[in-house]
Image (spheres, rainbow, N blue to C red):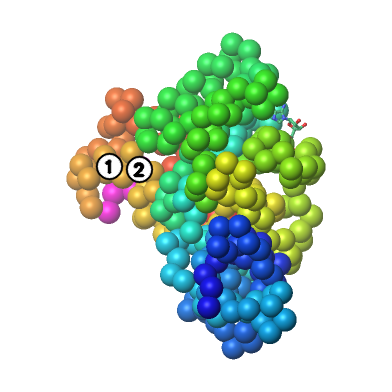
């Protein structure tokens, strides 16, 4: 019996890293099932597993998945109730954004961050392409960085073209299991190629999110960093994961709104027009940022409070 880390999954075969530096391809036993019956795949990248070598000595069979500290789900198909485990045991997640080319809306950031909060995975922002920014874009960048820093989300300013900001980010990534997300075109693949030059990934590719249709066939890749740690690239995933949220719990995932909400007069306050709402008061005084509050209201009013 050996223990290893799943670094690649194709749905039926798994690549496992064990004893620091060895790789073995594994399958799972027919009978083998995990506890979460809603998931279509029992094993995902990031899983710690036990396995046995087959008689040939070249391949293995997974016999158990060790307890997960967390895992991220998405729907197996657009309509089904079944879910797919995208990745397990994520230490932190990075959302890469850009001020221009393309512009990332604040509401997109906030939708992403509430999902991370719901999964209890620490999140950071990477603001890329600073080389393209003039004065107004720099101002906007500092505004965004200050909003999210003050809530507790670390922000990294990066130019992959000019090679600035990469060392600080590398130190943050080192020795952790990281997930990298962001809209198509912001520079995710470019970053991966810089962090691990032997990857030679193609940049400028349109994300296969739009191509994938009804059935999800792609599995995220977990790339091993030469300086230690892993980065999970999530093709076909603009945000990450899906969460079912009730309307009256959405504000729980805006940390600064949640904190202030304890001062609201009514325990079931949704922070819209209720009398004695501490959140509204904080927005008026500037203690809670208006853009964040606007995102909250928009998300609350969405008919479909399910995110991907
Ligand atoms: N000016 C500038 N362009 C960048 C930077 N980082 C990436 N790009 C370009 O942005 C485009 C999209 O990059 P890519 O890595 O494919 O983005 P992805 O869709 O997020 O994987 C490519 O043409 C990159 O060369 C940067 O820091 N500055
Ligand atoms: Mg890419
Ligand atoms: Zn309130």
Instruction: Give the residue at x 54% y 20%.
Output: 140
Q: Is residue 75 above or below residue 138?
A: below
- What residue is shown with label 1? 259
- In this rendering, position of residue 33 left or right of residue 256: right
**Distance between the alpha carbons at the discs numbered 2 and 1:** 6 Å
Q: Nearer the viewer, residue 276 or 12?
A: 12
Which residue occupies 33% across, 38% down? 256
Residue 84: mark = none
Name the residue furthest top: 135
Q: Position of residue 26 (x, y in %)?
A: 66, 73
Q: Secondary structure at mark 1?
A: helix
- Give 153 or 88, whichever is nearer the viewer: 88
**Residue nearest the observer in this picture, 84 or 53:** 53
Image: 256 above or below 164: below
Question: Where is residue 123 drawn, in percent x and y?
Answer: 47, 43
On the rendered image, what quadrant is the C terminus found in? bottom right
Locate residue 46, reporting x and y percent. 55, 60
* Magenta stretch, residue numbers: 268-272
19 displayed left or right of 69: right
The stretch drawn in magenta includes residue 172: no
Q: Is residue 145 above or below residue 242?
A: above
Residue named by callout 2: 255
User: Residue placed at 46% from the left, 71% from the top?
Assistant: 66
Provide the secondary structure element on which disc 2 rests.
helix
Q: Are marks 2 and 1 in contact (CB under 8 Å)?
A: yes
């Amino acid at each position: 019996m050996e223990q290893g880390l799943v670094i690649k999954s194709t749905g039926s075969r798994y690549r496992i890293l064990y004893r620091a530096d060895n790789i073995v391809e594994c399958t799972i036993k027919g009978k083998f099932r995990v506890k979460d019956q809603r998931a279509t795949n029992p094993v995902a990248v990031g899983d710690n597993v036990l396995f046995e070598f087959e008689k040939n000595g070249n391949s293995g069979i997974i016999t158990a998945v060790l307890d997960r500290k967390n895992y991220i789900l998405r729907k197996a198909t657009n309509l089904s109730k079944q879910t797919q485990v995208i990745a397990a045991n994520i230490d932190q997640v990075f959302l890469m954004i850009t001020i221009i080319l393309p512009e990332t809306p604040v509401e997109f950031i906030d939708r992403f961050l509430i999902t991370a909060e719901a999964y209890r995975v620490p999140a950071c922002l990477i603001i890329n392409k600073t080389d393209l920014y003039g004065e107004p874009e720099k101002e906007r960048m500092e505004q965004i960085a200050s909003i999210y820093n003050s809530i507790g989300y670390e922000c990294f300013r990066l130019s992959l073209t000019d090679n600035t900001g990469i060392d600080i980010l590398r130190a943050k990534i080192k020795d952790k299991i990281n997930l990298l997300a962001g809209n198509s075109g912001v520079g995710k693949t470019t970053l991966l190629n810089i962090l691990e030059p032997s990857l030679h990934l193609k940049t400028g590719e349109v994300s296969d999110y739009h191509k994938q249709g009804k059935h999800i066939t792609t599995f995220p890749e977990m790339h091993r960093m030469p300086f230690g740690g892993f980065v999970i690239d999530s093709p076909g995933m603009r945000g990450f994961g899906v969460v079912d949220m009730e309307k009256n719990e959405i504000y729980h995932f805006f940390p600064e709104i949640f904190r202030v909400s304890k001062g609201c007069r009514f325990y079931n306050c949704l922070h819209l027009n209720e009398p004695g709402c501490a959140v509204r008061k904080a927005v008026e005084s500037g203690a809670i940022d208006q853009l964040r509050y606007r995102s909250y209201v928009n998300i609350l009013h969405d008919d479909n409070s399910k995110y991907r």
